[in-house]
Amino acid sequence: MRKLIALSLAILLLFAGCSSGGGAASSGSSAPLPSASSTRKVTDMLGRSVEVPATVNSVAALGATARMLVYAGCSDKIKGLTDLEKKCDPGMPYAYVNSDKFPKLTGIASGGASSTTYQEPLAMLKPDIIFTSSTKLDDVNTMQSKFGVPVIALSYSGIFDESVYNALTLIGDIMGTSNRCAELVTAMKGWQKDLNDRTKDIPDSEKPRVYAGAVSFSGGHGIEGTYGNYPPFVAINAKNVVDETGEKSSVIIDKEKIAVWNPDIIFLTPGNMNLVNEDYKTNPSLYKNLKAIANGSVYSQINYNYYGTNIELAIADAYYAGTVIYPSKFSDLDFEKKADEIFNKMLGRPYIQVLKDNNNSFGKVTVGK
């Protein structure tokens, strides 16, 4: 009897062990053990070595980094972004084309020049990665330590700049969209080369003198708001009168200086024409004495600075300015088709009609109305 009982107990123990092991293997209910392949290290644009998940399913986008994520083809992975972007203003095409999604996402910061991060919503979101445009090393390290989430700093400027290409390449590597980003970088370099090739051999003596006014930076400005080293002009080797000052970015110019320059062609931002026209009422002689205005040589440049650089708009601006300044060099180009080619590639949809519908189209501009 004792032998029978012992044998029965042994059989029960054997079946219990098989059942336990077999159940775990077949159901997959137990959590997998961490492995070296579940994470990897990348270097962000501040030179920080950051350990990130091998597969990223959710991200939080601070400081308008959502723009680059949209370009990179991973808008579906964005779970939190700024309140400013949730408004999906047409002036921010990357947000507007996501009007069906962005308003529903978690607001994790106010957005804008003095953006405030919402600590609790960001902590509750628990994204796989936080992307930020902060260039302050201590702030980025503190954020990563505080939230216990990998933080990737993106830092880029201009429109055709290696920093832009590097940012896209980094995002593609992290998010698994490397092919998409490589294609986009190739397209951008192609547009850059095309614009340069069309204009690089034009002698300075044959170039009209041009001026871009009513440009937005830290808000809207009248005709005196302009740029030295204006990126769309740089891309087409234009003779920007403001470059004579040595300024390399946004600047407010004395309006009398514009009268001295008396450029052949003036470009103005449609969204700031109210400021230009109000000034015209108080100082009409300034405007009437500008030959570009007298000759009807005033054209639009769409504002591309809205919570950072909307690169697709800046590239379209360069092409449009090229058709105006050097018509013979761009005579083969259907501008609106080219612009929508750019928008399709970068945003996934055409955008010329959206600009027209929002009184922000390319074309001639009338001053004083």
Image: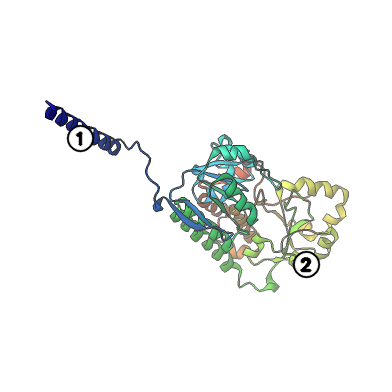
Using the rendered image of the protein, determine whether residue 133 is visible from the camera's viewpoint: no
On the image, numbered disc 1 is attached to which residue? 14
Q: Marks 2 and 1, Cα distance to the nearest angstrom?
A: 88 Å
Residue 68, x across and y down, in percent = 56, 51
Of 267 and 168, which appears nearest the observer?
A: 168
| Residue drawn 79% across the image and 56% down it | 224
Q: Is residue 105 above or below residue 267?
A: above
| Residue drawn 40% across the image and 47% down it | 34
Residue 183 numbered tag: none
Helix, strand or loop for disc 2:
helix
Residue 29, x across and y down, in percent = 34, 36
Q: Is residue 72 left or right of residue 243?
A: left
**Rendering quarter of residue 162:** bottom right
The single residue placed furthest to the front in the displayed view is 2
Of 258 and 336, which appears nearest the observer?
A: 258
Q: Is residue 279 left or right of residue 136?
A: right
**Sequence order check, earlier mark of 2 and 1:** 1
Residue 1, x across and y down, in percent = 11, 25
The chosen color scheme is: rainbow
Helix, strand or loop for disc 1:
helix
Q: Is residue 279 above or below residue 5?
A: below
Q: Residues within 10 Å of mark 1 (few under 14, many from 20)?
A: few
Of 249 and 253, which appears nearest the observer?
A: 249
On the image, numbered disc 2 is attached to which residue? 245
Q: Is residue 214 left or right of residue 310?
A: right
**Rendering quarter of residue 115:** top right
